[in-house]
Image: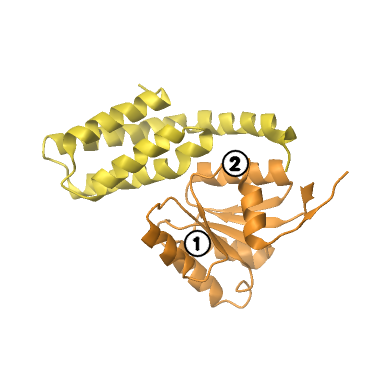
Amino acid sequence: MGTLMKRVLIIDDEEDIREVAALALEATAGWTIFTAGSGAEGIATAVREQPDAVLMDVMMPGSDGPTTFRTMQQNPLVAHIPVLLLTAKVQGVDQRRFASLGVAAVLFKPFDPMTLARQISEALGWKEEPTS
Amino acid sequence: MTAKNEPKLDALLASVWERGLPLLRERLDILDRAARAASSGELTETLRMEAVEIAHKFSGSLGMFGHDRGTEIARKIEQILSAPPAASNRLDELVRELRHTLRIE
C-alpha cells in the first residue's frame, strides 16, 4: 500500500528536525517536501507552493507556531491548508491549548521517522491507494 | 509505507546524526556550564534560559535518532531548569547521564 502523492511543507527552526522529517516523509511515503526555517519563510513558501499540508513546530524564535498559524488563517491564499503542530511539550494543558487553536492535529516530538507519514495521513484522513 | 526503505532511512538518519555532532557537543557544553553555575549558586537568568531552550530541543529531537533515554533525561533537565532555583546536584548528575547515554564524554 502507498499513500497518494502529497506535497507537505515542514516549518521548524531546527535544521536536524527539518531534515529528518523531510527524509522520513520522502523515504517512507514518497511525498514531495518543502522546508522553511521560520514562520515568515514558511508562509511565503506556502503561498508559492500551495502544499497539501503544513507540519509546523510550536516553539520557534520570532513568529512561533501558533502565531504563524493565526497569520495563515487571515491570509486567503493559505487559510485552506491544514496545519499540524509539532510540539515537545508533554503537559496536558499545553496540548489542549494547541489543539484549541483550530489546527488539524497536534503531533508530538520526538516523532518516529518510520511512522510520521502514517500519523499525518491518519490525522488528515488521507486514504491510501493500492500499489503493485 | 513499508519497511523496505527502513535501511535507507536508517543510513540517512545516521548521516544527519554524525553531521550534527559538533552542535550537539556545543550544546552539551552549555548544559555543563549551567549545571556547574547552578551548583555554585551562580546561574544567571541568561544562561538558565539558554539551557532550558537546549534541553527542550534535545527532548524533542534525540528520540528521532533512537535516543529515547536521552529524550527522557533532557525532559527532566528542562523541568528542573524551568522551575528555579534549580536542583543543582540533580542537574549535574543528569547532564553527566545525558553525555553517557549519547556516548559523548
What element does badge 2 sit on?
Answer: loop
**What is the CA distance from the residue labelled 2 to the residue labelled 1?**
23 Å
Q: Quadrant of residue A96?
A: bottom left
Q: Amino acid at mark 2?
A: Pro
| Residue at x-position 67% and y-position 55% | A121
Q: Is residue A92 above or below residue B77?
A: below
B4 horizontally vs A76: left or right: right
Image location (x, y in percent) of residue B46: 23, 48
| Residue at x-position 75% and y-position 58% | A127
Question: What residue did someone put label 1 on?
Answer: A39
Q: Is residue B53 above or below residue A123?
A: above
B14 horizontally vs B31: left or right: right
Farthest-out residue, right: A132
Chain of the residue displaying label 1 = A
* Chain corresponding to orange in the figure: A
Q: Are marks 2 and 1 in contact (CB under 8 Å)?
A: no
Image location (x, y in percent) of residue B101: 39, 26
Quarter of the N terminus of chain B within the rendering:
top right
For marks 2 and 1 on the same chain, the one whose residue lies earlier in the sequence: 1
Q: Which mark is residue A113?
A: 2
Q: Nearer the viewer, residue A26 or A45?
A: A26
Total marks in image: 2
Colour seen for chain B: yellow
Chain of the residue displaying label 2 = A
Quarter of the C terminus of chain B within the rendering:
top left
Q: Amino acid at mark 1?
A: Gly
A14 horizontally vs A20: left or right: left
- Give a yes or no on whether discs 2 and 1 share a subunit: yes
Image location (x, y in percent) of residue B15: 58, 30
